[in-house]
Image: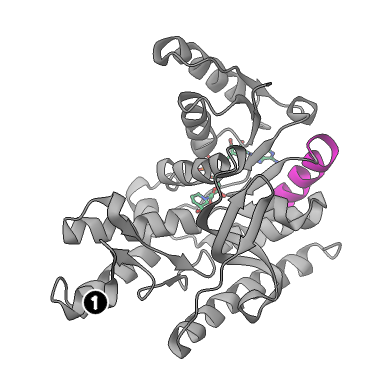
Amino acid sequence: MARAKIALIGAGMIGGTLAHIAAREELGDVILFDIAEGVPQGKGLDIAEATAVFGKDVSLKGANAYEDIAGADVCIVTAGVPRKPGMSRDDLLGINLKVMKAVGEGIKAHAPDAFVICITNPLDAMVWALREFSGLPHAKVIGMAGVLDSSRFAYFLAEKTGVSVQDIHAWTLGGHGDDMVPMVRHSTVGGLPLTELVAQGWMTQEELDGIVKRTRGGGGEIVALLKTGSAYYAPAESAIAMATSYLKDKKRVLPCAAWLDGQYGQKGFYVGVPVVIGAGGAERVIEFPMTDDEKAMFAASVASVQGLIDACKVIDPSL
Ligand code: TXD
């Protein structure tokens, strides 16, 4: 059976990291696409040469023409500009929406059967626009944000409790914004819901609230430290987990920006929810029962996403 073909649309900090991880995991042959000439070719060649060190048989090539992504099984989209200190994710909308139009048209023309994972910010609006521009089935276009936000949540919980990250299940739902919804009741440490951890004195409510706050601000914390860009290792690992679940039909349940057509009482756009990812793409949205407080937080996050989508429609009336 031929190796899978993975097209990375955007060969910047996340794109290069995606290529490196995909090669080490022997996920498939990698095409790094970018408008910057030389960068995708240089990164592709550098990692290709590394395969002789880590002993995996995959090809990596750089490209500046969409023809080179032809037949890709997976496209991971990071094309656009990242945040700088003082910028919100939403500030990127005007620039990155135009990029999504070019990327969507390129995928429509050359890789219409791909599973498309969007990473570009502001994520929930960009994944929606990318699906509109590409015309692919909704189940084959998904956004990466919840796996990253939930991994930050899980890491902070592991740091606090001393429990292995392997035995922590943390969930964030809603948009990839500062009003994302870390789901305290559904997240567990060693099987114990976080509310029970507080009841048993493992941590105080204030400490848990602090972890929730740090999770919401996780992206901004790294932007402030790096100063010249945003996080890229954890975002790349997160997208690879999603791509792997698709390519290997693993049916993992992962928090992703998925198309809603009635779930959670919402329809017609993308927002972070638990999704079963298998060979059919986003195969099923799982609905967590929510308390009134959780519903209110989710609704506020959804409203932020709707605002971004409305802004997209003003900028590009074709949407
Ligand atoms: O959880 C999440 N979804 C977020 C997403 C986590 C972290 C970063 N988030 C966003 O990903 C970030 O705000 C950016 O919008 C993207 C990509 O972040 P990255 O750090 O990889 O940005 P870089 O290093 O600037 O890379 C972007 C590349 C760069 O090489 C540009 O030349 C290229 O995108 N680019 C394009 N490629 C193709 N086509 C077009 N039009 C284009 N424009 C720029």
Question: Residue 68: which quarter of the image?
Answer: top right
Which secondary structure, mark 1? helix
Q: Nearer the viewer, residue 218 or 185?
A: 185
- Report whether the residue tagged 1 is closer than 8 Å to ligand 1: no
Q: Position of residue 128 (x, y in %)?
A: 70, 60
Is residue 213 shown above or below 78? below
The percent position of residue 297, horizontal first and vertical second, equals 48, 81
x, y (%) of residue 207?
A: 20, 73
What percent of the width, then of the height, locates residue 100? 72, 49
Magenta span includes 100:
yes
Q: Which residues are magenta?
A: 98-111
Determine the image quadrant of residue 267. bottom right
Name the residue: 39% across, 66% down: 216
Q: Quadrant of the C terminus?
A: bottom right
Q: Quadrant of residue 50?
A: top left
**105 within the magenta span:** yes
